[in-house]
Each structure stands twice: as C-alpha cells, then as structure tokens.
Image (cartoon, grey):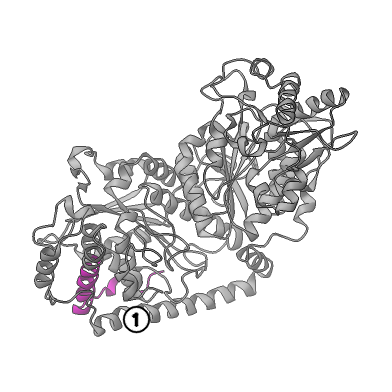
Amino acid sequence: MSTQPADSFEWTELDRRAVDTARLLAADAVQRVGNGHPGTAMSLAPAAYTIFQKVMRHDPADPEWTGRDRFVLSPGHTSLTLYTQLYLAGYELELDDLKAFRTHGSKTPGHPEYGHTAGVETTTGPLGQGVANAVGMAMAARYERGLFDPDAPEGESPFDHTVWAVVSDGDLQEGVSAEASSLAGHQRLGNLVFLYDDNHISIEGDTATAFSEDVLKRYEAYGWHVQRIAPREDGDVDVHALYAALKEAQAETGRPSIIAMRTIIAWPAPNARNTEASHGSALGEDEVAATKRLLGFDPEKTFEVADEVLAHTRRALDRGAEAHAAWDKRIAAWRGENAERAATFDRVSKGELPAGWEDALPVFEPGKAVATRAASGKVLQALGAVVPELWGGSADLAGSNNTTIDKASSFLPEGNPLPEADPYGRTIHFGIREFSMAAEMNGIALHGNTRIYGGTFLVFSDYMRNAVRMSALMQLPVTYVWTHDSIGLGEDGPTHQPVEHLASLRAIPGLNVVRPADAGETALAWAEILRRHTTDPAPHGLALTRQGVPTYEANPDVARGGYVLAEAEGGEPQVILIATGSEVHVAVEAREQLQATGVPTRVVSMPSVEWFEEQPREYRERVLPPSVKARVAVEAGIGLTWHRFVGDAGRIVSLEHFGASADAKTLFAEYGFTPQNVVAAARESLAAARG
C-alpha cells in the first residue's frame, strides 16, 4: 500500500532540503502573522515529509479518492505541519496560502478545518479527539471492506488502506484518547498507525509537570504493537529509523501500532529549541534568521522555496497518479467479479438510499402507548434489513437505548469469544466511553461510505459535548440516540434526569435536536434524518423517552419540525399549546379541557425547533399565527428554548430545577406537568393577551 518498497528507502540532498524548507516555511508563516505554533511544525517536518512523500498512499490531484490512506494530525495547533506538506505535495495550497496563515478567509486557518482545505481529513484542535477520529476511520475502513469485499485476502482488496495519525503528549493526556485507544486495541485495528511526537513540552513547560507514565507500556496493555525510535545524535529525527518503523507498523495487521519518536521542539533553532515558548509563540526575527543561517538559507529571504525542491516534492502528484491508476485497475477487476456489491458501492458512495427504503419503516397503531426509545429500536431493526451501510451501537447501554440493529452481528475482531462476534458486524459496542464514542462517530462519518449512529442517556451528552460540537462544526451526518430524556425516567433520580440538556444542545449551531412526541413521529423523524444526511449533512440528536406515550395519527409534517397536531374547534384558536416529546399528550389533554369550557385551542407538536425554523415564514406563521398572542409551551426541562415562541403574553410550563428519585407519574404531577396546570397557564396567558 506504500509508494515505495521497504528495502528501497532513499533519502537525498533534495529530501533534506525539502524538510528544511518546510521547517522555515512554518517559522516564516508564524513570524509573518505574529502568532501561532512554530516549534512542533519545525521538529515534525522530517516525519510529516516521510509520511507524505515516502509512505502514504494518496493522490494530491484527488484528495477524496476512495482508495487513499487517511492522515490525521491530532495536535491541530501545529497545523503548519500539515499545510506545508500539502503545499509541497501539490494539493490546492500555494505559497500565498502559507503567507496568509491564520488570516481571515485564508485556506490556512489556525487549526485544520475539514471541508475548508483540500487534504484536511478532519478538524482538529481540541486535543485527544483526533486520536478518536482516527480510531473511527479505522473502524469505518473495516466495515466498508465488509460491505463491499469481505472475502478478499488480507491486503488484496481495493478497500484496504491505512489510517496514519500524528499524536502528541497533549493528546495522550486527554482522557478521550485513552478511551479511544483502549477500544482500538480491543478491536485489533491493524489498519491504524500512530506516530507519537514525544517532545516533552507543553504550554506550562516540561511535561514532567504533569505527565510521567510509560506511554508505550500503557499502549502495550491496550493490545497495541509498540515501537520506539531514538533521535540522531544531533537531536533531529532519524528518518531511516522512522521509515523502517512506519513500514513495520503498516505490516502489523493484527493490532494497531504506535511509534514513540523523541523530538526536540523547534529543532534546529539555536536558542528556541526545547523551550515551551516555541510551542505557541513566534520565534522572533533574529531567531528565524539564525535558524536560516544554520540550515544554509538566506536570512534576508522569507518563504524561500527553491524551484528544484518544489519540482522534487511535486513528484508526489506523479506517484499519486500511478497509485490511483493501479487502484482503478483493481477496482475494475473487483467490479467485474462483484456486480451486485459494485452497484451498492456506487449508490452508497453517492450518498443515495436504496429504492423503496421508506416502505420498510414500521407503522405504529394510534392509541397504543409506546416508549419512543422502543419505537426507535424497531425503526433501526427495520431499516437495517434494507440499508446495509447503516450501523451503530451505544456506550454499553444498548438494552436501554434500543440501539441493537442486529442481535446476531456484533462488530468485533476475529478471536473475540462472543458467538455473535464478526469483524464486519453491524452492532458496535463502544463501551462505557461516551466522549470517544462521539469522536469515533465523527471519524466514521469522515471516512465515508457508511451511516453511523450511537446511543447513550441524554444526561450523558455532557460527557460527549465537545465531540458533538465538532460534529456540528464539520456538519457531519451522524445521529446521536439520546434516551431517558426527562424526569420521566423516574427513580434513578436527579443524577440521571436531564434538565438543562435540551436547551443546552439546541444552543449548538448546526446541531438538530429532535424530540418526537410518539412512535409515529419517531419513525418519521428517523426517515427525515436519513434523507437530510443525503441532501443536507448535519448531525442530529434524537431525544427519546423511557416511558410509554400515546400514539397519534402519523403526520408527514413532522419533517417540518413543527405542525398542528390538534386543531381548535369552534372558531379560530384563542390559545396555542406548544409541546415536545412526552409532554405533547399532556398538552392534548389540556386542550380537551379548554375546549370543553369553550376556549378554541390548538396543539402544536414541535419535535425539532431547528427544522421548524428552517421553514418558510408563511408556513411558520400558519402554524403559529402572530395574531394569537396567548400561548403556552410545555417541556420537561428548562424553558430557555421557548421564550421566543410564546412572546410577552405567553407562559412556559418547564422545570427550572433538578429532579428527584420517584416514579415518573409522581414527578410529573409534583412539578406541574399535568393537564390541569397547563390549563391554568393557558388561562393566565389568555388574560395577559387581553390585557
């Protein structure tokens, strides 16, 4: 899978010059803008160059080529490590882009951003998450192979490739990296290679301030293949040893691999090397000039790239074209032998769903009480039979989250003792690792060619939050299944009862929170999520009940986020009740009482505020006429979401405090989620509207 046989590693004067060019481009870029992280980019330049120019299979002319290896720079602060290699290899970056580093509108933002810069596989910055992204990519690569070419001998499928990741001391201190690395070892992800930049420097100085474990022993305990390479006598990276280690790691297909590589930050800057200052500050003009003299460059020139150096590194385009052409032949041969799988591959790679998939959606009988988590589970099992690219699991809560898409097929490596274990299985057991689950889901989505979901309790979305934020930032088509969505979960008490979570998650730009009222809304919501992941990718969070709720007639306007569930009778509505989830039936019962006293009342179910606010103004005003000032919003959580919908005369039946350990019926009555209390709030609102 590499561009060069293991026994023919060649390192020329032009290679050395190209590495030094990359070091100085990093120093110049930070110096020009006045801020950034030059030190790690300088010391990592030989390693990044070796990966991009000597080892990794990629095509700079086609950054999204399916057959490519993946590269993750987990310490995103050293973005110039990546940008300089993308520029040298011939991606869509040019010298002016490096000169525009960290400036508005440039292709070279302070941290790499997916979808913004060609060749950037994931947005990194919050440390540790790149580690988990890479693990997710490696998982997705295995599942992809299982979908399209499960019977090919190891290393002979066009879907075989390697995930390379550079990780740092900072990444490995973050707990999320431990979660993800533990799972990677358990899953025996032999297509995953970490290069650990062991530079002993963090913002506060030497890592001895906070970090002293033997990292390789830790990874050995996780089940990884471990190596350590020593630096050259002068402190620089020994590229020959590095290349040999990378090739050995790539050849180890039964375990993930990590290579610890001792570096000296900011090498070879004469005064800044091995200092914490070089981590996050410009070196200074004098130090940059001194480094250029040391490396044989003109200290008076900035952004100096010799023609012969660029011509040499741009040969990556030729190697990429050759690798791509060879892969095209392999994929053509595969197509000839796998017509049905090839048709599935073409559909999936276009993001299309199979014809007639909606016919598989279950239909739920009106009137019957069904927990929406249970309805979601039935939807997943039904869709699983017709959408093979859909897979997922939960953070050890499958029985509670109802996230088991196939009970007889668990995504587990060969050698796992469980009878349902299958390296290409449908159900993922993420373990009790919510944060890494979300970040791994991001990696799975970034890899492409599958559709991923993952579940836990809504209250534990707090553990996942930064990864959820990254899902939204990258606009990734992932689905979070958050169950036990309110005090309705009952006796587990306030530690497990989400109160502020719905409003808090709705505050994340680009995340669509969907809280269906019943089983029918749940099925329609899943359908809309799958459609949107095809046409308008964005993360979605489903908030689902533990307790049963009444089922109403299904209404396709669920896909619009809000709709009229029950219309006012006896004239135009005088008051509108807006509710979500398990509180919708409370609003429906309150409407019956109001109607009985002659108050025409409309009930609006609003499963997704975000979807509703996307609708044309005409539709939104048809559902919520501006002329109707009397409104009540009902949701068993803090009321922050609803002020803009109810207005000055409106009232909100909400929960502005933590819950308690008691059964759901008791808690709903205790905290006012009753028809009687909603009626009282409606009368207050009517009075305020008249006043």
Kindly identify the residue that appears in the image at 24 percent across and 57 percent down.
40
410 shown above or below 3: above
Helix, strand, or loop for circle 1? helix
525 sits left or right of 329 in the view: right
Quadrant into which the N terminus falls:
bottom left
Highlighted magenta segment, given as a residue range: 1-26
Q: Position of residue 579 (x, y in %)?
A: 70, 33
Q: Nearer the viewer, residue 51 or 445?
A: 445
Q: Nearer the viewer, residue 387 or 30?
A: 30
Kindly identify the residue that appears in the image at 61 percent across and 23 percent down.
487
Q: Position of residue 351 (x, y in %)?
A: 63, 62
Q: Nearer the viewer, residue 473 or 241?
A: 473
137 sits left or right of 389 in the view: left
Q: Is residue 11 visible?
A: no
Q: Position of residue 336 (x, y in %)?
A: 64, 75
Q: Nearer the viewer, residue 689 or 363?
A: 689
Q: Is residue 25 visible?
A: yes
Asked if the magenta segment contains residue 14, the reply would be yes
Identify residue type, mark 1: Arg
Q: Label 1, on which residue? A: 315
Assess disc 1: are there few (<14), some (14-19) or many (≥20) residues with their C-alpha within 10 Å of its C-alpha: some
Quarter of the rendering containing residue 573: top right
Quadrant into which the C terminus falls:
top right
358 sits left or right of 461 in the view: right
